[in-house]
Image (cartoon, helix red, strand yellow):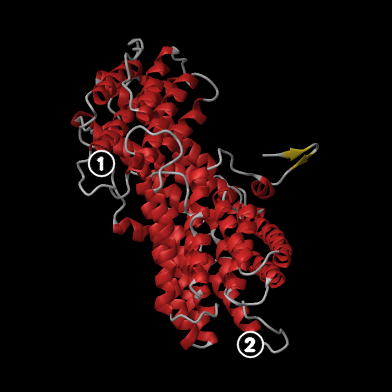
């Protein structure tokens, strides 16, 4: 956390000042430049600027979701929110034309409740919920000549164009084989790099951070390989090899975690094998001889066996079966959306979205207020501000206000200097290219999107609206701050507790499988359960970190959950060490059994402090 001499910066402000780092995603910049701007230019030249505005909006929202990763993952990450946005645009267009202000406000509130609950499911669902609500507000309020079904169609055209660019354009980096799988290759190679990093850090103070980095790399690779196939047939050699190489990394990750748990330094040569495997994944070259670690301990023997298995998978072409991870069923998704976390999430979104819509409708019909033709900006802005997964509430509000003021001032200057409409089309193209870089900070993203949206408004034939945009945003900030801190119906911190409960359940299933079903020798099943336990733990930690950076009035409702997650992480690490020990000898040492018992007691005690009532954990038998 950054701090000034003698003065600690509060967490919510530290979060607002934090910026993601990394290389410039030049491929995404190119796609952004070729998406909204060219679509708008074609429409303007064809004499249909409003059509281009809708298509550019679809491309803009798709650009916001165009994050680094594999092409197959991009199909779901960009496509699902685009479909939701098109549906929202369709519903909003017809509702805005045929229902009154009160009914429209109630409709938007109801949609906010549903979309908010669905947003708790995960990042893709959250993106879909955001686009659904924003597009509904735009459809209801933005004056466009096209009927609702045409608006939805052209919105999909814009998003589909950027998705097509994502699938078709090759990357600028050197590739090994079919460029369509470069994202998958990078993701799998990053897993082997993370394994090497954990082995190098074993026995040192950075071991825990390296294990967390390994979990993140495995999560990213799992997502990269989980999307729809890019070939017509499922038997493509490149896909089989990537799946097999990802599967070969799982026993290596398990052995590396067990070595880190032991707390002893590992010989440097142990990390060389995973590093060579990472190079082989990226370049397509042969691995060559892999340095074998000493076999003096169970985890080192497991690491050596995993390296031999990986070498065989790489040199043999990796044509074995891909590892199938457990997918979330419709029932589990529904439980998340309508559970405690989803209800709290949905209620918060519904209250802010509905309240902002009501205020906007009241101002629209108030004779003293004057022109309020852009009333839909108010609820649309509230959606971005109230989304808990986008950052702490105070941080979001501060960044949104600062970014909007900056973007409006910049656009006001550009509108005076640039010719119309050619200059506005150029502004849209430039902003589309800047979005992939601006997404690293919410204020920067807001500034770029503000300039782009104001340019689209003028292209659509409306008067300049830079200053009204500032007013609408500041009003939305006030509404969200007020509603976001009202006493909620039910328990606060429901999202954090729901994810933490799921993490505890996943860890319990994994522990039960390792200790009670050790004789089944179902290692792929065990690795899948291990992945699920670590992934659920990572999601819980992310929610806890966001909640801890809220203002004290909100942060206090999740106090103690960080300690529960830390204990749970140690329990899952110990379970992994137990699995390796049981594979080696079939029995646990006293150190393993005592540590498991200590952590179970500690977890029960910490849960009792943070959980109001109930939620007893089922026991497991510990073989000795």
In the image, 12 versus 506, the foreground residue is 12
Mark yes or no: residue 612 visible.
no
Residue 252: x and y, percent?
Answer: 34, 25
Q: Residue at x 47, y 69 (%)?
A: 113
Judge from the rendering whether residue 151 lies leftward or rightward of residue 356; answer left or right. Answer: left
Residue 205: x and y, percent?
Answer: 55, 23
Residue farthest to the front, as pictured: 45
Q: Residue at x 65, y 81 (%)?
A: 372
Mark yes or no: residue 80 visible.
yes
Residue farthest to the right, as pictured: 6
Mark 2 burial class by Cα count in 10 Å: few <14, some 14-19, many 20+: few
Judge from the rendering whether residue 501 lies leftward or rightward of residue 310; answer left or right. Answer: right
Mark 1 burial class by Cα count in 10 Å: few <14, some 14-19, many 20+: few
Secondary structure beneath dot 2 equals loop
Which residue has dot 2 on it? 365
Which residue has dot 1 on it? 324
In the image, 263 versus 389, the foreground residue is 389
């Amino acid at each position: 956390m950054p701090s000034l001499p003698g003065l600690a910066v509060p967490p919510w402000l530290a979060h607002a000042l934090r910026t993601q780092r990394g290389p410039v995603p030049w491929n995404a910049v190119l796609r952004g430049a070729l998406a909204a701007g060219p679509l708008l230019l074609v429409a303007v030249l064809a004499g249909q600027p409003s059509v281009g505005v809708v298509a550019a909006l679809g491309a803009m929202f798709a650009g916001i979701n165009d994050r680094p990763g594999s092409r197959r993952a991009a199909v779901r990450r960009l496509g699902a929110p685009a479909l939701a946005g098109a549906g929202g645009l369709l519903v909003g267009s017809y509702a805005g034309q045929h229902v009154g202000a009160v009914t429209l406000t109630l409709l938007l509130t109801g949609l906010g409740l549903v979309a908010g609950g669905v947003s708790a499911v995960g990042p893709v669902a959250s993106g879909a919920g955001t686009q659904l609500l924003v597009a509904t507000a735009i459809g209801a309020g933005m004056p466009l000549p096209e009927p609702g079904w045409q608006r939805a169609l052209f919105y999909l055209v814009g998003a589909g164009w950027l998705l097509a660019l994502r699938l078709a354009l090759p990357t600028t980096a050197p590739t090994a084989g079919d460029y369509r799988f470069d994202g998958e290759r990078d993701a799998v190679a990053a897993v082997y790099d993370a394994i090497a990093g954990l082995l190098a850090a074993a026995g040192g103070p950075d071991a825990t951070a390296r294990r967390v980095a390994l979990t993140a790399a495995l999560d990213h690779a799992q997502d990269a390989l989980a999307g729809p196939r890019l070939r017509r047939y499922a038997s493509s050699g490149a896909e089989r090899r990537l799946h097999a190489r990802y599967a070969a990394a799982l026993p290596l990750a398990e052995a590396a975690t067990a070595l880190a748990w032991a707390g002893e330094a590992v010989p440097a040569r142990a990390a060389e094998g995973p590093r060579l495997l990472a190079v082989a994944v990226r370049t397509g070259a042969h691995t060559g001889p892999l340095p074998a670690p000493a076999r003096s301990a169970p985890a080192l023997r497991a690491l050596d066996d995993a390296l031999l298995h990986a070498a065989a998978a790489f040199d043999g072409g990796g044509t074995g079966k891909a590892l199938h991870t457990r997918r979330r069923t419709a029932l589990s998704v529904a439980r998340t959306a309508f559970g405690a976390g989803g209800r709290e999430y949905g209620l918060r979104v519904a209250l802010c979205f509905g309240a902002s819509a009501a205020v906007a409708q009241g101002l629209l019909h108030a004779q003293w207020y004057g022109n309020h033709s852009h009333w839909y900006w108010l609820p649309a802005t509230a959606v971005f501000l109230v989304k808990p997964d986008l950052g702490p509430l105070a941080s979001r509000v501060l960044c949104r206000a600062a970014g909007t003021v900056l973007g409006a001032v910049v656009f006001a200057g550009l509108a005076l200097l640039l010719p119309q409409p050619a200059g506005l089309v150029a502004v849209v193209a430039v902003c589309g290219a800047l979005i992939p870089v601006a997404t690293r900070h919410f204020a920067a993203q807001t500034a770029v999107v503000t300039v782009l949206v104001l340019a689209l408004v003028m292209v659509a034939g409306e008067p300049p609206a830079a200053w009204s945009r500032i007013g609408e945003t500041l009003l939305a900030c006030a509404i969200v701050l007020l509603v976001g801190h009202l006493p909620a119906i039910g328990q606060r911190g429901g999202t954090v507790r729901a994810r933490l409960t799921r993490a505890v359940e996943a860890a319990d299933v994994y522990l039960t499988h390792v200790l009670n079903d050790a004789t089944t020798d179902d290692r792929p099943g065990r690795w899948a359960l291990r992945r699920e336990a670590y992934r659920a733990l990572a999601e819980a930690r992310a929610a806890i970190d966001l909640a801890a950076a809220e203002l004290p009035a909100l942060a206090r409702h999740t106090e103690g959950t960080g300690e529960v997650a830390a204990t749970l992480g140690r329990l899952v690490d110990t379970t992994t060490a137990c699995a390796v020990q049981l594979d080696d000898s079939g029995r646990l040492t006293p150190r393993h059994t005592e540590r498991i018992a200590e952590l179970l007691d500690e977890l029960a005690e910490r849960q009792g402090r943070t959980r109001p009532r109930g939620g007893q954990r089922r026991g497991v038998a510990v073989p000795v």
